[in-house]
Image: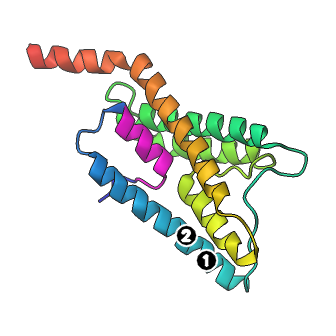
Amino acid sequence: VSGAHFNPAVTVAILASGRCPDLTPGKAASYIGVQIFAGLSAAFTYAYIYRGATFALGPAVGFTWAGVAAAEIIFTFVLCFVVLSVAVSERTKASHMFGIAIGSCVTVGGFAIGGISGGSLNPAVSFGIAGAQILNGGYFYKALLYSAMECAGGLAAAGVFKITHDVDVAAANEKISV
């Protein structure tokens, strides 16, 4: 139904790439709304199961917001660029291996930056963690900060993808004119 849109940053990257004509801004907004609702639902379910226990969103001990920004932007960029390359590009699409490529980005990103920022890479996850943390005195603004960083990574990935995969558009236009 959704084309496997689970991450608002990825949805933003796909929309910004202009490579998915079926993904209108309205449809992207509805996907993002559902993604955020799902993240909040999952987080509150976690809090319910663990009797109100939640965890904070923010820099790990010994790290700063600058480190969080670098980590979340860079690794969300990598995730979004890989999604665009293996699932969206007609020329580099890897229909048999895209799951392992995308899943590997999430796994490597989690291991690489989990100890710095928590390795969210996903505004729906960030909204969920910060939303549930309100139960224990947390601050929701952190979800907005993380989401801005993650969407910045997605937009940067779309920009680089447009430059590096311009040959896709040229090849498609060539087929049309022949």
Residue 141 appears anywhere in the view = yes
Residue lying at 74% horizontally and 42% vertically, measured from the top left: 68
Q: Is residue 1 above or below residue 116?
A: below
Does any portion of residue 87 appear in the rendered image? no
- Element type at mark 2: helix
Label disc, if present, on residue 102 of the rendered structure: none
Q: Position of residue 52 (x, y in %)?
A: 73, 82
Q: Could you tell me which quadrant the N terminus lies in? A: bottom left
Q: Is residue 132 magenta?
A: no
Q: Return the x and y of residue 130 as percentages of the image width and height.
A: 66, 64
Residue 162 drawn above or below residue 12: above
Residue at 61% x, 72% y is: 43
Residue 131 horizontal/vertical position (percent): 62, 68
For residue 44, the mark is 1
Query: Which stretch is magenta?
Result: 5-16
Classify residue 40 as left or right of residue 16: right
- Residue 40 image label: 2
Q: Nearer the viewer, residue 117 or 130?
A: 130
Does the residue at mark 1 contact the one at mark 2 (Cβ under 8 Å)?
yes
- Report which quarter residue 168 is drawn in: top left
Is residue 11 found inside the magenta-colored segment of the image?
A: yes
